[in-house]
Image (spheres, rainbow, N blue to C red):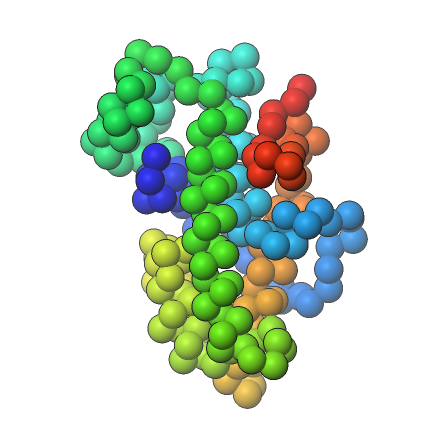
Amino acid sequence: MNFYFCFRIILFVVCFIPIPTFSTKSPSSIINNIEQENPIACYIAQESFLLLIKFAINDLEISIKTMEKNAKQFQIDIDALKEELNAEDIELGDVIKLEFLINRVFKNVQNSENNLKNDILKKDENNEGTVTKEYAEKDILKSELFKRLPKKILDFVLVKFTNDQNQFNYRGLMLNFLNLYQNKKSDHFIFIPEDNEWKIKF
């Protein structure tokens, strides 16, 4: 499933969860490498799990018909979904394993997050965790990772993480995603580093 569909699954969750008060402090709980490297992908994977598990069959699968029925809540483009499922040879009467669906979400977002980080590091030559406000507005917030969010959310983020020197604190933004993830972290949703995948365990 392409990035557009995957991101739309949890788009409404991201939009309506307030970004915490700015903080540069690390979360108090133990942080895994994947959480440090890809806090946005981890957060989105976690939110996908928390959303989809409510509709799951035996906590492990979700029916395509359920996704179709709840398309508005999931923010899914049903026509695009059907097209992608046909390409995967999955019929509408079938079910999809949550692990498969969430890992597709995670890996797509992870790729986009890594690409954005690589671009940012080229601009943050002194590794200070900041870039210019102009770069953030033009490149970061219009990247594949953020561009589907409403303008009012993007404007809020830009103001929230820009200091008096007109520098955008992207490291602070990433840390806030990490805090969001840590605050709602589930013991039933485990990342397996060697597989670069999430597993559901009850």
Left or right placement of residue 51 versus residue 9 in this view: right
Estimate the x, y position of residue 115 in percent, counting from the top left.
45, 59
Q: Report the number of numbered marks.
A: 0
Q: Nearer the viewer, residue 135 or 47?
A: 135
Residue 117 drawn above or below residue 74: below
Estimate the x, y position of residue 5 in percent, counting from the top left.
33, 39
| Residue farthest along the bottom direction in this orientation | 165
Q: Nearer the viewer, residue 172 or 19?
A: 172
Residue 3 drawn above or below residue 162: above
Instruction: Examine the image and state in which quarter residue 65 appears.
Output: top left
| Residue farthest along the front direction in this orientation | 194
Instruction: Examine the image and state in which quarter residue 188 appears.
Output: top right
Q: Quadrant of the C terminus?
A: top right
Residue drawn at (42%, 67%) of the image = 140
Instruction: Examine the image and state in which quarter residue 64 appears.
Output: top left
Estimate the x, y position of residue 27 in percent, counting from the top left.
73, 55
Residue 73 drawn above or below residue 85: below
Q: Quadrant of the N terminus?
A: top left
Q: Is residue 178 visible?
A: no
Left or right placement of residue 92 versus residue 170 in this view: left
Q: Is residue 174 visible?
A: yes
Residue drawn at (53%, 18%) of the image = 60
Residue 194 drawn above or below residue 149: above
Q: Nearer the viewer, residue 148 or 86?
A: 86
Residue drawn at (44%, 29%) of the image = 101
Residue drawn at (43%, 44%) of the image = 108
